[in-house]
Image: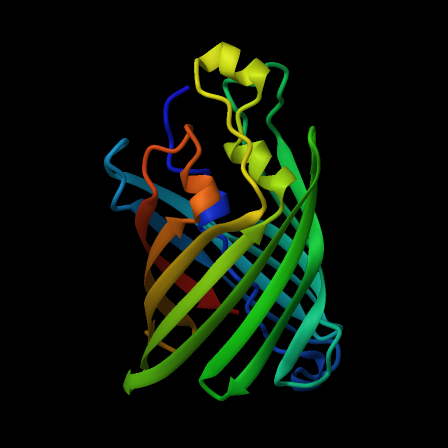
Amino acid sequence: MKKTWAPLALLMCGAVQAGPTRMMMPEDTEDMYFGLAALDVVHARDSGRDITLLPTLSVQWSSGAFLDLNSEDGLGLGWHLSDDPSLAYGPLLRLSSREVRSDTPGQRGGLAAEVGLFASYRYAHNIQLGAQGMASGNDGGLGLRAQLWGEASTPVAAHHALTLGAGMVLANQRYLQAYFGVTREQAGIESHRLYAPRAGMLSVYLQPSWEWQVSNKYYLNTWLRVSRLGGQAAASPLVGQRTRASLSTMLTYHY
């Protein structure tokens, strides 16, 4: 199997951003935006440049239910349970494309599902902290991962703002084994050494971004995300590159 840095969806895990809560929205209303995002892997020695165009969609209903589709996390369905405008929390379901390993016969593609909880707290008008915990089933049992993140933003000109975000992802042994471990059977297929990672840090990331409100309806967002694998994942024989950077630009229409 070709050495890889890691599944893109895992190492570019985005955080659930707190949208308008039920208290902030009039009854029986919705808030929606949709658009197109261009994702460019700008630092990948094994594959060069790789530009992908993906749709984005976010809908928030006054009941607290929300839906989001983005280039980093796939499709998310959740529910805001808080009426406090500074606090958001609730259940979350995510669907994304299933990673298929060439050294594991019988694996099928399709959709992979994760269920869990999210929470975010607005510490100040421009500072937000958040966390989410997700669980998924695989052949090795129940995989668990948790993400902690924070971001701070500041206006730099009329209709322009800069944001700096950072986060880390932790995972249990079964989760890391599914993506980075090598069993005896898998080693016999691809000639990799045996590897059984321990629970620990999956990755950390730093993400500066720029937002431009082009008009009342259109927004242009550009962000650079630099991610680095944690020690247990990076030591896997499947990993050829520990650090990756990606540049994304997204044009959205706010309905």
Position of residue 61 relative to residue 159, above or below, is above
Which residue is drawn at the image coordinates 37% and 27% (left, top)? 3
Q: Is residue 98 visible?
A: no
x, y percentage for residue 14?
50, 57
- Left or right placement of residue 206 versus residue 13 in this view: left
Tell me if residue 166 comes above or below residue 55 in the rendering: below
Residue 178 visible in rendering:
yes
Q: How is the image coloured?
A: rainbow
Image vertical order of residue 174 relative to residue 166, above or below: above
Camera-side residue of 72 and 107: 107
Q: Please tell me which residue is depicted at 50% across the width and 11% down the height of the picture.
A: 189
Depth check, front residue: 37 or 48: 48
The x, y position of residue 132, in whole percent, is: 62, 62
Q: Residue at x 32, y 67 (%)?
A: 208
| Residue 1 horizontal/vertical position (percent) | 42, 19
Q: Is residue 140 left or right of residue 149?
A: right
Residue found at x 40% / y 69%: 165
Across and down, in percent, residue 55 comes to: 47, 50
